[in-house]
Amino acid sequence: MPELVPLELPEGIRRLRRSPSSGLGFLGLDPLTQSDQWLLGRLTAMGAALYVGGRGTLVGYAPSVANPWQAQVAVAGDDGPALRTLLAFLRSAVACTSFTATLRAADTSLPAVLDCGFREVGVLRDHAFRAGIYHDVGVYYAAVADLRGDTPMALPRLAPDQVSST
């Protein structure tokens, strides 16, 4: 059964920096130019949670401020099973009914997002500054009914120190 292992945010930031794409665009972040302290503050302010999927891929989400049943999701690479596991968890444990993702056309995670059933619903022109120029960023959306794949519901596996004995 696919699983998600929760990460503390500092460990998630370290993994994000080591990801093949250096974490560019993951939940709107830029680990190449933003310090660990800034990233930690931003992820905390967003209410973000980060996990490691079954193949060791970093996935994460941040709840929507405007819609409590929606989450912005991200996957660090082309790992559809890890993203599907995150989406299943968000549907069952967090009660999300829709999801968004923002990606550049060159992002390595775009195939995984599209394979899960997301569709492009808009473009933010010149929204991301990478490699000295501004790039357009696509806005992708999926409702629960749009999702593809049959990943069973997955609850995060908890480390022994995260389990309450009471």
Image: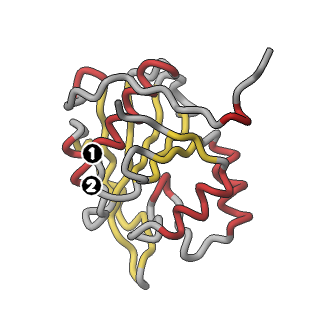
Give the answer, above or below, for where 126 lies relative to 149. below
Circles 1 and 2 in contact, beta carbons < 8 Å? no
Residue 19, label in figure: none
Q: Quadrant of residue 77?
A: bottom left
Q: Residue at x 20, y 31 (%)?
A: 148
Residue 163 x %, y %: 70, 27
In the rendered view, tell whether residue 116 sits above or below residue 7. above
Q: Is residue 98 above or below residue 122?
A: above
At 68% from the left edge and 66% from the top edge, which residue is drawn?
36
Dot 1 falls on a residue whose secondary structure is helix
Classed neighbour count for the residue bearing mark 2: other residues with Cα under 10 Å, few (<14), some (14–19), many (≥20): many
Give the position of the N terminus as an image quadrant.
Answer: top left
What residue is at 52 percent from the left and 22 percent from the top?
94
Drawn side of residue 43 relative to residue 30, left or right = right
Q: Can you identify the residue that label 1 sits on?
A: 80
Q: Secondary structure at mark 2?
A: helix
Observer-nearest residue: 2 or 113? 2
| Residue sitting at x 74%, y 64% | 37
Q: Between disc 1 and disc 2, whose residue precedes?
A: 1
Mark 1: few/some/many CA within 10 Å (<14, 14-19, 20+): many
Along the line of sight, the residue nearer the viewer: 152 or 37: 152
- Quarter of the image for the C terminus: give it: top right
- Type of amino acid at the residue the image marks with label 2: Leu
Mark 1 or 2, closer to the camera:
1
Left or right relative to 105: residue 101:
right
Query: Label 1 sits on what residue type?
Result: Gly
Q: Residue furthest top?
A: 166
Q: Is residue 126 above or below residue 79?
A: below
**Which residue position is annotated with label 2?**
110
Q: How far across and how far down the image is residue 7, in percent?
A: 60, 46
Separation of disc 1 and disc 2 at Cα?
10 Å
How far across and down, in percent of the image, does residue 157 sit?
Answer: 54, 32
